[in-house]
Image: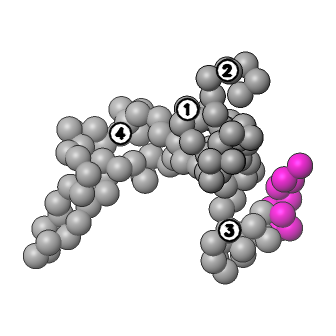
């Protein structure tokens, strides 16, 4: 944000796993798989899919005008890409268990 005076906010993101690509999300209707968002266009291999990112909730930075308008973030929003091993999103007990495992047995540091 310091290098882009047009940016109103910034958020940390992590690269989305190729298995979670929107083009791979399906509905099941009467036992048949149906594309939910868009057709895969025969792109099944990870390197053929675009790199997508998802906010990980770790860092949000906004200009004071953005906050005063009642928003946490707004466009244009800059991205701060974080490594996957530092991007644990804890929403339930399984996520918590994974975080404990990574900090304990697996010896991953979150510093």
How far apart are labels 3 and 1 at the CA level? 27 Å
Q: In the image, is 7 to the left or to the right of 52?
A: right
Pointer 2 or 1: first along the chain: 2
How far apart are labels 2 and 4 at the CA level? 35 Å
Q: What number of labels is visible?
A: 4
Q: In the image, is 79 to the left or to the right of 20?
A: right
Residue at image mark 1: 76
Residue at image mark 4: 45
How far apart are labels 2 and 1 at the CA level? 10 Å
Residue at image mark 3: 90
How far apart are labels 3 and 4 at the CA level? 29 Å
Q: Assess whether mark 4 and mark 2 are in contact (beta carbons under 8 angstroms).
A: no
Residue at image mark 2: 4
Q: How dense is the environment of label 2, judged by Cα within 10 Å: few (below 14), some, or many (20 and up)? A: few
Asked whether 18 or 3 is in front, the reply is 3
Task: Give me the residue at 26% from left, 51% from top.
Answer: 37
Asked whether 67 or 99 is in front, the reply is 67
Look at discs 2 and 4 and give the one toward the viewer.
2
Q: Is residue 108 magenta?
A: yes
- Provide residue 30's location: percent of width, then percent of height: 10, 76
Look at discs 3 and 4 and give the one toward the viewer.
3
Task: Give me the residue at 35% from left, 39% from top.
Answer: 45
Choose top left, top right, bottom left or bottom right for residue 33: bottom left
């Amino acid at each position: 944000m310091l290098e882009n005076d047009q940016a109103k906010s910034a958020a940390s993101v992590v690269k989305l796993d190729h298995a979670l690509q929107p083009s791979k999300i399906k509905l099941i209707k009467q036992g048949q798989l149906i594309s939910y968002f868009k057709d895969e266009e025969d792109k099944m291999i990870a390197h053929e899919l675009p790199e997508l990112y998802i906010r990980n909730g770790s860092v949000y930075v906004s200009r004071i005008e953005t906050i005063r308008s009642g928003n946490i973030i707004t466009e244009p929003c800059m991205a701060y890409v974080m490594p996957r091993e530092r991007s644990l999103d804890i929403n339930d007990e399984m996520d918590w268990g994974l975080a404990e495992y990574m900090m304990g047995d697996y010896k991953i540091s979150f510093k």
